[in-house]
Image (cartoon, grey):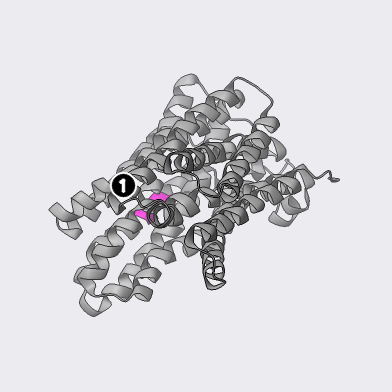
Amino acid sequence: MTETPSTPIVARSVLIACIVVFALSQFQRAAGGVFGPVLGDRLDLTATALGLVVGTMFVANLAAQGPAGAALDRFGPRRVLAWSLAVIGAGTLLFALAPSLGAAAWPALVAARVLVGMGMAGSAGGVQVALARFLPPGDYGYGKGLLVSLGGIGGLLGTWPLSVALERMPWSVSFVLAAGLAATALVIVLRAIPEGAPLLTSKDDAPVGYLALLRDGAVLRILELGAVAYAPITTVTGLWGGPYLQSVHGLSPEAAGKALMGLYSMTIAAGFAFGWLDRTGRARAWVVVTGAIGSAACLASLALLPSPGVALALALLASSVFLQQFYIPLGVLLRDAVPPHALGRANALMILLGVGMIPAMQTGFGAALDVATASGFETAAAYRMAFAIVATTIAAALVLYSWPRKG
């Protein structure tokens, strides 16, 4: 194996490029909640058709994780990120033009979101591998924290600013500009990220496949906890937090939206905090465990308290969202558990499990509400049961992570 020399200037340039790419991905993830209603009204789409347009991006993202991880290990982050951004740009451009295609509009919209999802599969793992390869080893966690914090601004741009753009500009102009952002990110990646020496040559160890990683006890325990890294946050901020605040605490839609924006901002603050903490060299595994325990405890408190006020409920939700950023040091543990030429595949597994758990937890939360309501429980009690399920899921993953095993 050969190492890629890196200078402070290279490391800084790579970090900036990765933040830009991550921000673009966060924008694409958040945009569905904004363009969905606009698209439904403009094309008179049914709820099912609209759901397919929004959801196919996530399905394509999961389906492409395996090939993307293998490509990262073989070709390196620069090439994979470049191709991924080109695909995202092409998909976004098609998305800009699709509504004007008449009868072909809906298939074109679906195809566009598939392209975006495929591109995001390579960009998500690509930024992680680039940071691991070109940042000093002790700065990897700090870089991941900055990635979450500064890149999270892209998610904010995909909410209210995109809504304003769609109100004041034609659809095609808004998304042609978004495609231009992908092209800009592509140029930045090609200029900032070096090609680098190959991590795997014919004289190196054999490539590490996905099954070999899953048979590794140290990797498997990290993946088990990683399965609940993203889903609790997305379940609250992306779907059920608003209905909970409105139906249980009586907030208006506008007030609930502001509260959710505040909850989302906690991920940005937590990125700085967890990144700084990792850089200090404190016990990384204990930071992970403490964060997971704290998040589960906050959600368990919401389940156990009979009638928490809105201030306490928001404080507990905000604390849970903040502490869920334990996945930042967890990602550093994953880097340390695998050889450098297997990090692409390892990150692909982490993303596959973490993102795949999102629809499962969101659906399970809703199913718990339906079952509890059908059984005669009041709305507040139904939400308490649903929060209990999320807290129990995190606790179960933590038990698996902590369980001693061989390998």
Q: In the image, is 380 to the left or to the right of 288?
A: left
| Coordinates of residue 201 in the picture (x, y in percent) | 67, 42
What quarter of the picture does the C terminus occupy? top right
In the structure shown, which secondary structural element does the residue marked by tag 1 occupy? Answer: helix
Nearest the eye: 246 or 62: 246
| Vertical relation: 236 (above or below) 6 | below
| Coordinates of residue 127 in the picture (x, y in percent) | 49, 40
Question: What is the magenta segment's predominant secondary structure?
Answer: helix
At 69% from the left edge and 25% from the top edge, which residue is drawn? 283
At 83% from the left edge and 43% from the top edge, which residue is drawn? 404
| Vertical relation: 151 (above or below) 176 | above
Can residue 94 be seen here? The reply is no
Question: How many numbered marks have been drawn onto this rendered protein structure?
Answer: 1
| Vertical relation: 379 (above or below) 314 | below
- 81 within the magenta span: no
Question: What segment is highlighted magenta in the picture?
Answer: 83-88
What quarter of the picture does the N terminus occupy? top right
Write down the quadrant of residue 53 in the picture: bottom left
Q: In the image, is 292 to the left or to the right of 370?
A: right
> What amino acid is at disc 1?
Ala
At 36% from the left edge and 38% from the top edge, which residue is drawn? 153
**How many residues crowd around disc 1 within 10 Å: few (fewer than 14), some, or many (20 or more)?**
some
Nearest the eye: 280 or 337: 280
| Coordinates of residue 83 in the picture (x, y in percent) | 43, 51
Can residue 88 be seen here? The reply is yes
Write down the quadrant of residue 202 in the picture: top right
| Coordinates of residue 123 in the picture (x, y in percent) | 46, 47
Q: Which residue is mark 1?
A: 255
